[in-house]
Structure formats: C-alpha cells, structure tokens
Amino acid sequence: MVKEIEKAGFTVVQMANLIPVAKTVGANRMVPTISIPYPLGDPSTSKEEQWELRYHRVGVALDALTTEIEEQKVFDVEI
Amino acid sequence: MKKAVVYLNQFFGQIGGEDVADHAPEIREEKVGAAMLYDQLLDAEVTHTVICGDNFMGSNTEEAVEIILDFLKDVDFDIFFAGPAFQAGRYGMACGEIGKAVKEEFDVPVISSMNIENPGVEVFKKDIYIFPGGHSAAKMRDDVKKITDFGNKILNGEKLLPAEEEGYYKRGIRHQYFLEDETPAYERAIDMLLKKINGEEFESELPIPELDLVEIAPAIEDLSETTIALVTSGGIVPVDNPDKIQSASATRWGKYDISGMDRLENRDSNNFKTIHAGYDPAAADADPNVVVPVDAMRKYEEEGRIGKLHDYFYSTVGTGTTQKEAARMGKEIAQELQDANVQAVILTST
Amino acid sequence: MKLELGNFYVKDIEFGAKTAFDDGILTINKEEALEVVFKDNHITEADLRIVKPGDMVRLVPVKEAIEPRFRVGGGPVFPGVTGKLRQAGEGETRCLKDMSVLVVGKHWGGFQDGLIDMGGEGAKYTHFSSLKNVVLVADTDEEFEQREQQKKNHALRWAGMRLAEYLGEAVKDLEPEDTDTYELEPLTKRSKELDELPCVAIVMQPQSQMEEKGYNDLNYGWDTNRMLPTFMHPNEILDGAMISGSFMPCSSKWATYDFQNFPLIRRLYQEHGKTVNFVGVIMSNLNVALEQKERSAQFVAQMAKSLGVDAAIVTEEGYGNPDADYIGCLVALEDAGVKTVGVSNEATGRDGGSQPLVTLDPKADALVSTGNVSELIKLPPMDEVIGELEALARDGLSGGWEDDEILGSSVKEDGSIIMENNAMFCGDRIAGWSPKTMKEF
C-alpha cells in the first residue's frame, strides 16, 4: 500500500513497529512505533506520557517528510 | 469441442511486412497463417484470428486493446494464444499487452512464447504464461508445439506441474506442492545443512526475491503549505463499520470525515474503534489516536508546522490481505488523495 | 544426559474390559478412561472414539494431539504441567507408538483449532491421519470463552494429557519391543573425534505471542512469553518438557505430539558423531514487539557463538509477524558466522502471488518450505463427523469462514467443505514431517 501511494508521487512516511516488515514491503521513509497493538501510546503509562510520545514521534514523521533521502531510511526517535 | 482464439502480428497474419506495421486491429472468423498450425495441434478449434500491426499496438496501445476486447466480447472461446513472438521486441510487447488484457477481461488461460531476450518476457511473465521460444520463425513449429501441448493440458483438465517442469517462465506465483517422493522436510533440512557446511551447492526452497523498491519521492519543502493525510492499515473505523471492512483478508477500505474533530473519540463514546483481528484491540478501542494520531496532527496544524490535516482519514485492515488487494486499495486511495490535492501522507500500521 | 524411549507399536486399538496392551493391541476400559477425563469438574460431557487410517471420518475442531507415555519409576509425563516439576530427558520413558490421543471439541472451536480427515483425499494433509487415534470428544463449562475466537482450551487440553498418561500406564510392567537411546556427552567433555566435527544446534521458536497466560506453549509449565532464549538438552523436548499452546492458525502449530517426536531433532541425532557434533537446542520464542524480537535474536546468536556452534537449523511455529523473529534470528546467526538452514511455511495467499514471508533477507539463503497457509482446499463430505462440522464456519477457525462473497460458507449443506490450509490440524508439519514444499506455478 505504501508503495502504491509513493508510486503515485506522494511523499509518504510509514510509522510501524515492525521495521523489518516495512523495509521488506518497500517503504522508503520509516519511523518506528512502540508496538503492534498500540503504535503511539502505551496504555500502561499515563495519558500525558502517551501524548508526549505520540506528539514526538509524529513530529519525527513530519521531519522525515521534509528530509531528502538516497535510500530506505529509519528515522531515530528519542521517546 | 473447445474453442481457441489466436493473436498474430501483421507479418504472421499475412498482411505484410514492416511497411504495414501500423495495420489497425482486425478479427477474422477463420484460421490465418500460423493459426492453422495451432488448429492442427490443439484439442480445440481455432475459430478466430486477431491480427494487429506491431506499430499500431505499440503506439496506440490503449486504443488497440479496446478494439480487440470489443471484437472478442461476443466470441465464445476457452483459451487465447498470442505469438510466438521469438526475439521480436515489439511483437513480444504486443502479445503481452493483449494477453494481459484478455486474461483480465475474460478470465481465460492466455499462453504465449518468446525468446528469453524478448523484453516482453520481463514485463509480462507475471500476467500470462510465456514459454521460452527460439530466436526466429525457423522455430515456429517447435514453439507452437510447446504452447499448444500446455494448452491441451489445461483444456483437458490435466494436473498442471510447477513452472520449472512445465517449462514456462516463473511468474512469482508460489503454491504448495506434494513432492512425488514425499521426502520429508527434516531430510531436506539436514541435507541442505550438510551441503552448506561442506561448501557444496544447495538450492533454497524459497529463493529470496530482490526487493522491489519504488522511486523515492522528493522531500516536502515547506510543510506549512502542505496538506497531509493520515492512512492506516490498523482497521480504525466508526463503531458501526459503515463500509463493512473485513477484520482480516480485507478487500475494502473506507474514508472517514474528521473535519472539526480535535481527536478521534473512542468506542465507549460510540465514535471510533478497530476491527482488525490481528492484534489485541483493547488499547485502540480505548484511544483510537494511538493508531491514527489525529490529536497530534491537529496540534501541529494549530502550531502552523503543517498547512492542513486532510479532512478525511483512510483505513483498511492489513492482516492476511493479499498483496494484490493491498496494491489495488493503495492505488484507489492514492487516486482519492490526488483528487483531493493532498501532498503528503503519514501511514500508520499495526 | 541419557534418555531411553521404549517403543510399543500399536497395531490396533479397541474398547474392552480392562485397559491393557497385549501383542500390539491396546484395549481400553472406556468407563475407567472417562473417569480420568472427568477428574476436572469443568468437563461437562465426554466420549471416547477410536479412528484409524482410512476411516471415512472427519474430526473438527481438533485442539491437541498427544502421544501416550509412561515415565518409568513414576512421575508426570509432562513435568511442571501434569505433575510436579522434575528433570525430563533422563532415564526411561515408554511410548505407545503409531497412535495418538486427539482432543476434539464437541461443540466449540476457535482460531487455533483444526481439522483432520482420516480417509479420502483430505487424509494427505495431516500427519495424524497416518496414526491410530483415541479421540476424546468433549465439552466444558468454560462459558467465558465459548464465543471467543481465541480459546485457551484449558480443560480439554489437560484432559487429553491425563488420558495420555492413563493409557501410557498400560505398558508400565512390559518390556518394549525396541528402544531408542538418546545421549549426548556434556559439551566440554566430548571426545576429540566429536570435537573435530562441525558443531550443530537446533534453534526452536515456539509460539509465545500472547501476553495473557494460558495460550502459549509451556516449557516445564512456564509460559514461553515470559522467558528469554535458553539452552536445552534435546532429550528434554523429546521427553515432555514442552507442551503445545492454544494460539496461532492451526497448520502452523506444533502439537504436543510433535514436540514429543520432533523429527528434526531425531534426525540430527542420527548424524551425531558421523557428520556433525550435535550441541543441543537453543529454545527461543516468538514475540510481538520489534525490540523483543531483536532481543531474542541477540540472545540466540550470543549463545551460539559462546557454545562454538558452526551451523544451526532454525524453525518457527507460526507465520505472519513471527516471520520477523524467524528471519531476524537467521540473520543474527549468519552475522555471527553461523551457517543456517530455516524450516517454516509460507503465506503466499490464495492466489499464490503474495510475498512468502513478511520479512525477507538475502542472508537467509537456505530455507526449507513446508506449505502455504492460505492454499484453498475443497473436500467432499465424509461418512461421519466427530465434533461439530459447523464449527469450521461459525467459530472463527483460522482457515474457515461463515460467508465469503464468492465462495460462500466453508461448510456446505451436503457436508462438503472449502477451507484454507490454515485450518488443517498441524498441516504444515513444521516439526519436520512435511512432504510438501513450495513451487513456482
């Protein structure tokens, strides 16, 4: 799916936990998420912590959209 | 008796040579040129011959395909042959184009023959059966024999063997297969291991295909002028799942209006939930923003970091979905995004 | 560690006055056997049936398969599960061969349950159609999960193990027909001849992806979700240390019977001292988050390196995201200089056109494929169904469905079925029996 969207000319970033899967599928810009069932907010943490993590990682995804890349790239996250 | 249709170019359809290569498609209710050889060898009658100039097909592909499909819509046939195209590049591409279209439109077996050097092989081997053929028409009889033998097997409902045994170019279609000698996996594994240890040649049963990468889209220059859409394979939908997206092996997707929403409200408040069967739904049901981060995007929109969050998000389910369906849905969603003037996409997967 | 598995070849099974094994005939006192089953109050209904290869009988939903055994000197066949914890893999255990105990739900099936045809064209799809089977068909009061797609099947699976132990007692005082002896010298005390052979290990990735207890494979009763990769003696696996769980599409599963007989282990034993020096088993697991997957792969590679492993066979009980654990582990081993062979099934879709594993890596250059989970299988009606045929369509079995736009329901009115291989009971025989491979078509 990510490939079809990129093929159509859109700059796209895939946020996924299983980065090896995203790579194999052919995503070019990738940002890791924390798990499969809750990619952007661990329910065992507080609402504030979940929000901070989500706000940060979505921010990294936005950075990824504005970054020129030469090959498949996984963008680093801090929280 | 079963019925066959054969596609030939201007030369093998006996119209003429290079000078008539822009000959428009025609259909004849008879066996022309090479079609007679097919008729002799097939357990079916060749009822029609389609003839088209290679240049016409090459430069007016869409039109040519449309005309030919129109010819065929009232013809009753069980199998379709194109070529053999030998090493002729334009003819090979033409056989592939029309073969693929006929397969998709009428769902009948389509068989062609091309030399390995023919560019049509790489482009179309996944769409139709293509058998390796000779360099030139000197191999006509051999090549037609090969593909009609295989065609007869299909027509007679015989069991089809793997590509390497039948002889056609591999198509990337993998099915399970009971080994004739029933050699169990443990024997095959130990054998492969000992060979690998000893530096002998071995053959993996799953050769790793090369990564099929797409061209990297350029970076967005100014996000504050950009409309960004959220797309997910995590199955977030309105609680009543209006598009009836399947929980696994999905063939449907939906788009849901989020204009005016600061965040996705949850299942308990009767708004959004996940229908994905491949993961524990508790967290996503409690807060769908952990899968589709509408709340974070709104914040960035408010801060002016992004121009606009697109008014809809797009959703389907990734688990068990075949690549073919995923690609189709991806294309459809991409079309929507284009029509809506979206410039960038964040895709979240679970 | 030395294990002697004494073999009693079961030629026939019948019901009779006394549970006993005599001259290849296993006789079962049904009433007494059912008393063993009913020891758990949660079992509400139960019956025993006998099915043999060629019988035109369909079993569904099948939940578990177990080889009946007796531990000489007493003690549970499954330490830490059916009795106290003790060391498995040492001493003598007696086995009733060519048979199994199959556990079938009388009504309710689930995602992880499967189907067996004992005869007809469907028989080729499972190993268990080649065995004589005592079928426990039962129902329970576990109402909390009756309509859940994921079932723990606790009462039924444990009843099956009790029954297998009960039947195993029939050979308590008998001499086996023959004995398989499995022995490995301690790693640091091996002979010079052995040390010169390439050191080979088996890396197993049992199913352990459920965070909640009760679904995963157990290692001496310990939930494999809560373990890191560990080093085990192969004898432990052959002698009841591992039991099957109740999660994962069925064709990809290892039944407890598969662990007890694990053909890859037995076959590697045959090479020990001839072509290889069999180091042992690195018991890993399968995880849900990338970091967990990477952590396990790192542990496996470290252990292999520290043990001096030259080559390894890696095998996974599952498909889908577990492929990331599988390929990740193969790659970590190759990066550590260990030559690998992988054994698993593929998921290329009904049309065969999908990517075979969810992650791929060119370093995984020696793979054995045992089947396609989504292969469509159509089978005619059978004379008799044990269990409930409707479960295949109704209860969310991984290879069944209630309604498909094109194919309709998995269960047709005449009793014929259409399903994905996913629901064949341990159909891809990833433990090593599979006569199937994958080919290009």
Image: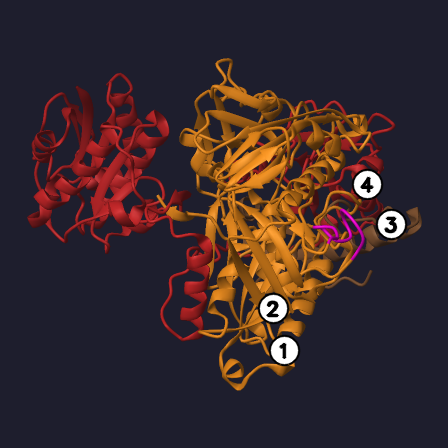
Per the rendering, the mark at residue A50 is 3
Q: Secondary structure at mark 3?
A: helix
| Picture quarter with the N terminus of chain B | top left
Few, some or many C-alpha atoms within 10 Å of disc 2 (few <14, some 14-19, many ≥20)? many
Which one is closest to the eye, mark 4 or mark 1? Answer: 1
Per the rendering, the mark at residue C280 is 2
Q: Can you tell which chain is drawn brown?
A: A
Residue matched to label 1: C187
Whether marks 4 and 1 lie on the same chain: no
Judge whether residue C137 can be spotted in this image. no
- The reply to whether dot 2 and dot 1 touch (C-beta < 8 Å) is yes
Region rendered in magenta? C74-85
Colour of chain B in the rendered structure image: red
Give the residue type at disc 1: Leu
Q: Which residue is nearer to you in this view: B218 or A6? A: A6
What is the magenta segment's predominant secondary structure? Answer: loop
